[in-house]
Amino acid sequence: MNTELMKERWRRNWYKFSRNPLSILGLAVVLAIILIAIFADFFAPYPEHAFVFVDFKNAKRPPCWQYLCGTDMAGRDILSRIFFGFRYSLVMAVSVLSVATPPGVLLGLVAGYMRDTWVDIAIMRVADVFLSVPSMVLALAVCSMLEPTLYNAMLAVTVMWWPWYTRLVYGAASSIKNEYFVQAAEVTGASTFHILFGEIFPNCLSTIFTKMTLDVGWVILIGSTLSFVGLGAQPPTPDLGTMVSDGSKYIPAQWWISLFPALFIVVIILGFNLLGDGVRDMLAGD
């Protein structure tokens, strides 16, 4: 594609994106979370509180100027642990989507292009089996068979996530395969590989990218839920779900121990959802 045409396309897309104030808000929230996660050691007021640290003298202190979000039962600064929790949440989201998306997309492309064949039936029936089980139940089942660690929590979420991309790309590929440019490629003798990845796949990218943006928040929510029930990251890892679970034992007296990690989970999900909505509107019609 011509460089000038690419620049014009980017300018047009950015104009469409920037017209929605909520999309800009979502982008700002996501960028802030990413920066804090990367540079948590600098942003956290007490970075040493993120892991093994005990200060019983300052345990269960309510929010104040010294500890803006208060301290937990071990005297650790909750805000500092939340900042490091961002890092683990983003690592989970990026890892899960990086592993689950490629096979899901590949299977969806193959099944969509070879629709109504035994390949289509085999792939989509397996995907339907996974989709028929509620996502959280499947993740809990996988996690319960493994040692409760952050890595195994990511594995459990990955197992339940790929069928959504298979189903999404299957629908898009089934429609695109009937377009004239795909038929023209078939007539000229183009290979199946070229048709899948040179003709159909580029036209699915906007749909895939939009779903990935929207999925980040949901992956983080599922991961936090697994940690909340004790099947994810284990203490003293500053995982947001684990922090909410630990603080729930002290409600309502020490409400801040659970409240602030839970609020930041909501902020993360809201930020990525607003960004995803903006990306969807921006790429609509492209």
Image: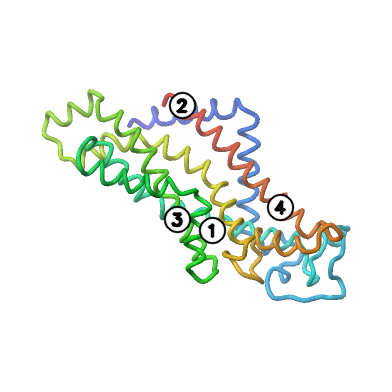
* Picture disc at residue 262: 4
- Mark 2: secondary structure: loop
The location of residue 246, given as percent across then percent down, is 72, 65
- Mark 1: secondary structure: helix
> Which of the marked residues, 3 or 4, is nearer the chain's N terminus?
3
Is residue 54 shown left or right of residue 284?
right
Q: State the residue at coordinates (59%, 42%).
A: 272
Q: Residues within 10 Å of mark 4 (few under 14, many from 20)?
A: some
The location of residue 282, given as percent across then percent down, is 50, 29
When the figure is inspected, residue 221 is found, relative to residue 154, above or below; the finding is above
CB under 8 Å between discs 2 and 1: no
* Picture disc at residue 91: 1
CB under 8 Å between discs 2 and 4: no
Give the CA distance from mark 2 to mark 4: 33 Å
- Mark 4: secondary structure: helix
Q: State the residue at coordinates (26%, 46%).
A: 122
Tell me the residue that label 3 is attached to: 158
When the figure is inspected, residue 142 is found, relative to residue 126, above or below; the finding is below
- Mark 3: secondary structure: helix
Give the CA distance from mark 1 to mark 4: 18 Å
CB under 8 Å between discs 3 and 2: no
Residue type at tag 1: Val
* Picture disc at residue 284: 2
> Which of the marked residues, 3 or 2, is nearer the chain's N terminus?
3
Is residue 207 shown left or right of residue 79?
left
Mark whose residue sits in front, 1 or 4: 4
The location of residue 110, given as percent across then percent down, is 26, 42
Using the image as rendered, state which of residue 276 and residue 120 is in the foreground: 120
